[in-house]
Amino acid sequence: MTALSVAGVPDVSVVIPCYNEEMNAGPIAKAVIEQLEPLGISFDIIFIDNASTDRTVAIIKTMCTADPRIRLIANTRNFGQMRSPTHGIYRATGRAVIGMCADFQDSPDLLPHFVARWQAGVDIVLGVREAEKSGLILTAIRGLSYWLARSFGDVQTIPNATGFGLYSRRVVEAIKALNEPEPFFRGLLVETGFPLETINYVRPPRLRGKSKNNFFTLLDFAVAGLTASSKRMLRLPLYLGVVGVVVTVLLLLGGLAAFLTDRPIAPWLIGAVFQAQFSLIFGFMGLMGDHIRQISERTRGGALVLERETVNMDREAA
């Protein structure tokens, strides 16, 4: 085993969120160790379990006993795909943190490349996988979510970057200081403005198990990510209200033109009244949305998850 760096702090912490990954927990830990040990760096592996209902926790506990570099955080319940992984990243103590999935959808072969770029001074290194072949509906939803993020997002997200990558300690601390209650981590990485590089890769075939995601969980994740990374969406009704005012004025001008040319003006006036009502409704909704945004800015805080138990989290690796 490799000794820890100064003051018992590992060079790299690998955070692996999991839910019902009894088939993958052991193999992914073995794959990570095989990739990092030859680099001559100190590291630990932190599994954060989101209330699995299978033997995942028991298997990880056995690994923790055999290798103190392997650590476990077991949540009291399933806190979702945003909060749980981010909590694990916050709890990591490495000088750099690597986030990756347990089910081998993120290639362990990239870990040495991440570390090399970090050692060269890059704060954020992200794996960007080639676009997957999906059904028509999923492809359309994915394309729509990226378009909405580009159009309304406060910062530009990186398409097909799922968060698999390495983040330096100062990046993690900067994101942690934001106290986001529902952290869209891949968007927050870009928001920090620290130097960022990407490495393209082909997603390897799933070796074991199957994805825990379905259409609804992916849609929920996309919507949550959009709302977390875009405050301008709250102002969208206000923009629509302004457009409605312009349409109202045009209708009134049309009514005036009809009056001057001795044509019926009733349709123009009725349309203007209805359009004005909708404009007022959307305008007030937009103002309320902006107030909600300001309230959100002022009331950030609270725990991301509650831990049921931990193993090796307060123990230095050998």
Image (cartoon, grey):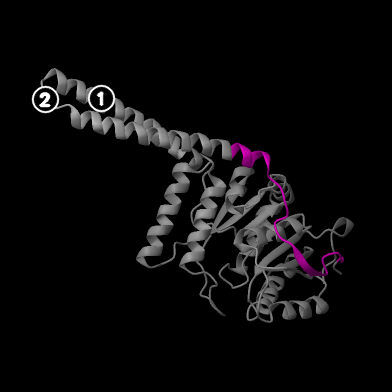
- Going by the picture, which residue comes out furthest to the left? 262
Is 307 situated left or right of 249 in this image?
right
Please tell me whether residue 294 is drawn above or below residue 259 in the rendered image: below
Location of residue 195 by image quarter? top right
- Going by the picture, which residue comes out furthest to the right? 7
Location of residue 304 by image quarter? bottom right
Q: Amino acid at mark 2?
A: Arg
Residue 279 percent coordinates (x, y): 38, 33
Is 189 situated left or right of 176 in this image?
left
Q: CA distance from mark 2 to mark 1?
A: 14 Å
Residue 307 percent coordinates (x, y): 76, 65
Q: Amino acid at mark 1?
A: Leu
Is 212 situated left or right of 6 in this image?
left
Residues in magenta, as a range: 293-316
Q: Is residue 129 visible?
A: no
Is 138 situated left or right of 69 in this image?
left
Q: Which residue is mark 2?
A: 263
Reply yes or no: does residue 50 show up in magenta: no
- Residue at 72 percent across and 72 percent down: it is 33
Please tell me whether residue 169 is drawn above or below residue 14 in the rendered image: above
Location of residue 102 by image quarter? bottom right
Please tell me whether residue 258 is drawn above or below residue 25 in the rendered image: above
Numbered label attached to residue 252 = 1
Quarter occupied by the C terminus: bottom right
- Residue at 78 percent across and 81 percent down: it is 62
